[in-house]
Image (spheres, coloured by chain):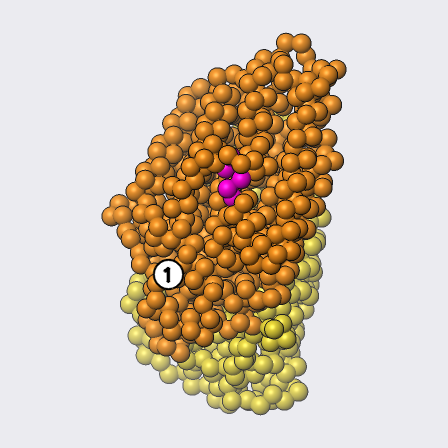
Amino acid sequence: MLEELTAGFPILSCILFLPVAGAVVLWLFDEEDMVRTSALTIALVELALSVFVLLRFVPESAAMQFTERVPWIPALGISYHLAVDGISVLFVGLTAFLTVLVVVYSWDTIRHQVKLYMMCLLALETTTMGVFVSLDLILFFVFWELMLIPSYFLIKLWGGGAERHYAALKFVLYTLLGSVFMLVGIALLDINYHQWALLHHTDQTYSFDLLDLLRVPIPVSQQLVIFWLMFLGFAFKAPVFPFHTWLPDALLEGPIGMAVVLAGLKLGTFGFIRFSIPLLPDASKSETVVMVVVGLGLCAILYGAWMALVQADFRRLLAYSSVSHLGFVVVGLFALNYQGLQGSLLTMINLGFSTAGLFFIAGFLYSRQQTTELSAFGGMAKQVPLLATFFLIIGLASIGLPGTNGFVGEFLILLGAFKAKWWFGAVAVLGVIFGAAYFLWYYERSMFGPLGAAVKGTMSDLQPREKIIAVSLSVMILWIGLYPSPFLRIMNGSIQALVDRVQQETKVSLQDNRTGRGY
Amino acid sequence: MTFSLNFALSDLLLLLPEIFLTCWLCVVLIVDFSFPRVPKERLAYLSVAGLVVTLGCLAWFDMNHVSGTLFGNMFVLDRMAIFFKIVILGATILVILASIEYVNRFTLFRGEYYCLVVMSALGMMFMVSANDLLSVFVSLEFATLGFYVLVSYLRDDLASNEGGLKFFILGVLAAGLLAYGISLVYGETGKLVFSDMASAQPTPGLIIGFLLIFAALGFKVGAVPFHSWIPDTYHGAPTPVTTFLSIAPKAAAFAILLRIFLVALGTFKPLWVVLLVAVSILSMTYANIVAIAQRNIKRLLAYSGIAQVGNVFIGLAAGTKMGNDAILFYLLAYLFANIGAFAVVIAVSQAIGTDEIEDYRGLGRRSPFLAFAMLLFLLSLAGVPPLAGFIGKLYIFVAAIKEGLYTLIVVGLINIVISMYYYLIVVKQMYINEPIDPSPIAISGPMKTVIYVGLAGTLVIGIYPQPFTDWVVSATLMFANFIGPSVTVVLPVHSLGS
């Protein structure tokens, strides 16, 4: 059984509900500056709480920490169960960090309905946090679905593109389609638990609790069905190629703040590592699943990179590069070895800094030229040297240059992929090369070379608020790049437990995990 | 067959709520006649007062586990009947409160309106206690009689008259089918009480008889293919009547369906599961697809109601205790969301005079409260967590998955996605489009109460459902020992396993 550590104080609940409570408070204010200041304050307090959790987190441990557990709907075995472990705790910090930056970024770029925007943003933060800290599958699903509502409004009301209505609807319906399949998968897990519980005469006959479900053996044939159902849910959200078509639309048409959250927080792949792989280890390591999923991942790497190469719009380029990066994450996850899982988890965090960072850069470019089309740029490095510098730093992180965070994650993934099957790694490496090509090519054409015709003579360099964003992102990028061990130490325990669970023989696992360590 | 009506006076206590309400109805009517100068609004409050007292009496029954049967098993008062009576009375109170302003549109017979509403409620209270086929027929007709008048209450409105006529003709047809079905069943079995039929053999006559009864009840709940009266009637009827029609008769008819399928037909479960699955799939899919094309909010809600009925049928098809709990819970969630949504429709039409979805543009600016309430109600109907509708859908799906009804579940889930689309169309009009006339919308006090109650129900049931699940679980305890021939719970997946 997994040991659980409680904090004695419901700090995760505070983290979870502070933003939404703050959103309600914002409703009371009328003055826009007041709204902005309070939103920032709430986001900063949230960040402080998250940092506190990160500092108090016991590293190198597979335990669920800061556990809170209260029955919610006992008739169906649903409980309010929150906890973090090495897999999820970093995402909590990342979410709080990015929200602060988005609030700072939106300070003067959002001009109409500021109050509603900030309320949506904070509500989105609560739901995202909920996805990361929930251990009950229904609670998780509640937050997973709720996320759609603020996102829908954010894309629709503050999106810049003409097609934003279409993009918002497409985003909601696609994600919903995936998640209803996931709901069936979740229900099947519950029914499986129910049958087991009836056989073993346990007190509780229904449970959606991750820790309860982990204890119950699931026949391999059933695991496969549940795996594919949940796969659809996560794949639509991630999005994994070929379910990605909503992503470029949503990222291009929605506001920058939304794009940062959508591209920076990899909820779909988090779902794989949190639920699919530990709950369904036999299905996850079966030949078919590995081949199909890794195959899709490899396709995504190549397809995304290839598409990114020919995009003239920077945000579209970023959308496809996101697809490509997610391909890496998926390949690493389903290499199912220590390095692969560790690299994937680290890369998910990294993308929160680098891809999200590039979206901020796109926002900076957009606020200067009112577009992110390549034709509006050219030779800008001389006029906006700081912008160009940070663009380069964050961009290099995104392509995985040694010394930046991207390198550590990608290197581990490739190592894991080569260990699993040599040709997984061989194909994935191609993606790295393409990745360097599309970024550097775009960078060169927009920042260097002759001055573009549309570039205005007096373009201002980074404003103070923009500097804050760029500097804090660069600091994180270099920190993880040069000294990743604090981050790796946090994940190690949980990753090791996960690897143990996956590599256990099926039969043994049924008896063993009552006494054994880890999952 | 002889009827012997031996009962002690104390047995009549079981009928206390109904007797009290009948007397109260007469009081309201007498007050209306005797004091024609009394504002009709007072009559509304008078009726509500009577209903609240009845509700209190039922709550007391429920807490003290009062139960029993009367009149040779024709009338049963068990916890499930009490549950449905409370739901119906709750709906009636809210509908009356939501009507107060609307009633001014009627040119004549404003006072009788309230009497008719309470009379229908009374009929439905008998419906949910009906324990044999005769009392089903009598109480069902009694309840519908009031509605025939109510639907065509807008005398000068063509749509209202058309809706009323359609409702009447199809209602009478359904009554005919019901009577014919009952005669066939009685001819085959010689029994009328549900529990006596449990041992019957499935002869062709019996099957046809039950199919006819099912068709008649299908008209009442508005399931496809018996739905054809719904859109026009909902559209034409005065909106408070539509509200009432969309909730209370459906709940009452489901109470009868539960008794028929689980008590009388329990042994035929393998036969009727197919029927219910088909009706459920048809209702959900047809209604959700047609709803997309609707331009009128009342028609949209009519179709959404048909689809919701399809969802309830999923629970019925599961045919277990858990399925029943889920149905009761779902109806409770549906009650609050639907009444709330219709209350918003009434409030809006009171202010701007139309029911076109087009005219909801910019409601978010004109009345943030109404728009936000509508948003929550629609999301609850769509089944978005953590609102009541989500828990209801989840409950029903879990019950059905447990019985291995995978096709049904997949269709149901895809339908959720489709329904989300048309609910979002309304949301888009309210929040995204700019209003043509930005003047704010005033809401009357009673209407605000109704909307607040709807919001409270939707949120509380969604966030803290435990008391409600406990309630429905205990309300269907009588089905705890129901053992239908079990549908084998084997995942049809062995072909996929490698």
Q: Amino acid at mark 1?
A: Gly
Give the left or right position of residue B14, taking residue A169 as reference: left
Residue that lies at the very extreme toward the left in this rendered image: A8
Q: Position of residue A185 (x, y in %)?
A: 53, 62
From which residue to which does the magenta span run? A404-409
- The residue indicated by pointer 1 is A518
The foreground one among A437 and A321 is: A437
- Quarter-wise, where is residue A80 in the image? bottom left
Give the left or right position of residue B390, taking residue B301 as reference: left
Q: Is residue A378 visible?
A: yes
Compared with residue A228, is residue B206 higher up or lower down, i.e. above or below? below
Q: Chain of mark 1?
A: A
Q: Predominant secondary structure in magenta?
A: helix
- Quarter-wise, where is residue A16 in the image? top left
Chain drawn in orange: A
The foreground one among A235 and B460 is: A235
**Chain B: colour as depicted:** yellow
Q: Position of residue A42 (x, y in %)?
A: 38, 31
Q: Secondary structure at mark 1?
A: loop
Q: Quadrant of the C terminus of chain A?
A: bottom left
Compared with residue B414, is residue A126 higher up or lower down, i.e. above or below? above
Q: Is residue B179 visible?
A: no
